[in-house]
Image (spheres, helix red, strand yellow):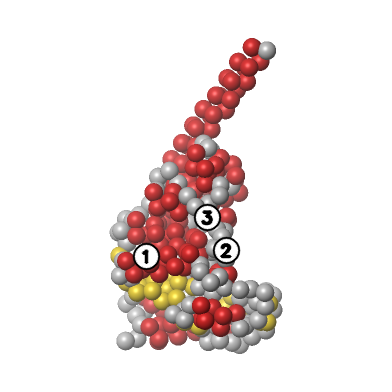
Amino acid sequence: MKNFLLFTLKTVLLTLAIAVVLDFMYTAVYAQSNQRGKIDYIYNSQGRNYDVVVLGSSRANNHIVPQLFEDKGLKTFNYGMSGAHLFEADLLLKLMVERKYKIKNVIVEVDLNLSNDQRADGIASRFLPYIHLSNTIKEHFSRESDFNFLYYIPFYRYVEFDSQIGFRELFKTAHKERTNYFENDGYHPLLSTKKGRMKNDLTHLKPLLHNKYYEEVKQICKINKINLIAVMTPMCSNTKGMNYFEKVNKIYPEIHNYENVVVEDRYFSSCGHMNDAGARLFTARIIKDFFNK
């Protein structure tokens, strides 16, 4: 029995030691990366200057064209991320402040993502390699139910989110394989002529009375004297429950409702995402309304 217990103890200690070493190795690789995604691009940077920063989900990433701002002499980058919630948009802005970015205007897409205050694991997990390196990331995740596992158990986060930050992504990061996230100043145009689903139903979607991450974005902008432009972006005409956007405005009257600025289906790649032509029409309207003074 004594030998069994000793063997078990040695196995546990060896496993823990391997986990600590692997955790250190993975973190060291990610800590040197700034070419794989928008999160590491911000984390491994200092003091960038922007006239306009775009935040939000794919409905920001596919809808707001930085080049049109650049044509007006406004340095712009689209930090929208497909699949992101306001949890991630808020944390991106916090990271920019931590990295001493100078930002004049933030355009944040807040519409469908106001209906939840949960993190999107596919995106949020990509912050986790830096959870021991950034107090901002640590504090943001500290409110999560699995924070103790993510923070205190070595290598746990890399195993739990293997498809996002596991060995395959580590290998690509170590070999400095670039992605297309930085083309078009972060904007991802939808150019395909093949349309996706051109129907949507928002009937059962309800905006939260208090979305804490949107409120934090507002507070960060206020403290850092950043002009915040919160917008709701267009949906295709064949959408049920369009009064969702009116519900949003009753709770948050400061959000600009642009859901009906672009309406023809030829400007949409799918019901919730405009194609490049639609995005350019929408962006031109934003510039006209806020940047032509």
Q: Which residue is mark 2?
A: 83
Q: Earlier in the sequence, mark 1 or mark 3?
A: 3
- Of tags 1 and 3, which is closer to the observer? 1
Comes first in the chain, label 2 or label 3: 2
Q: Residue at x 59, y 41 (%)?
A: 159
Instruction: Determine whether label 2 and label 1 are within 8 Å by CB.
Output: no
> Quadrant where the C terminus lies?
bottom left
Mark 1 in CB contact with mark 3 (< 8 angstroms): no
The residue at 34%/56% (across/down) is: 98
Crowdedness near tag 3: few (<14), some (14–19) or many (≥20) residues, C-alpha within 10 Å:
many
Spatial separation of the CA atoms under disc 1 and disc 3: 19 Å
Residue type marked 1:
Ile
- Residue 235 locus on image (x, y percent): 59, 80
The three-letter amino acid code for the residue at tag 2 is Gly
Front residue of this view, candidates 212 and 58: 212
Rendered image: mark on residue 220: 1
Residue of label 3:
124
The N terminus sits in image quarter: top right
The picture quadrant where one finds residue 203 is bottom right
**Real-space Cα distance between discs 2 and 1?**
23 Å
Q: Secondary structure at mark 3?
A: helix
Nearest to the observer: residue 105 or residue 174? 105
Q: Look at the numbered disc 2 and give the secondary structure of its residue.
A: loop
Q: How far separated are the C-alphas under marks 2 and 3?
A: 10 Å
Callout 2 touching callout 3 (CB < 8 Å): no
The tag earlier along the polypeptide, 2 or 1, is 2
From the viewer's perspective, is 224 left or right of 165? left
Q: Quadrant of residue 10?
A: top right
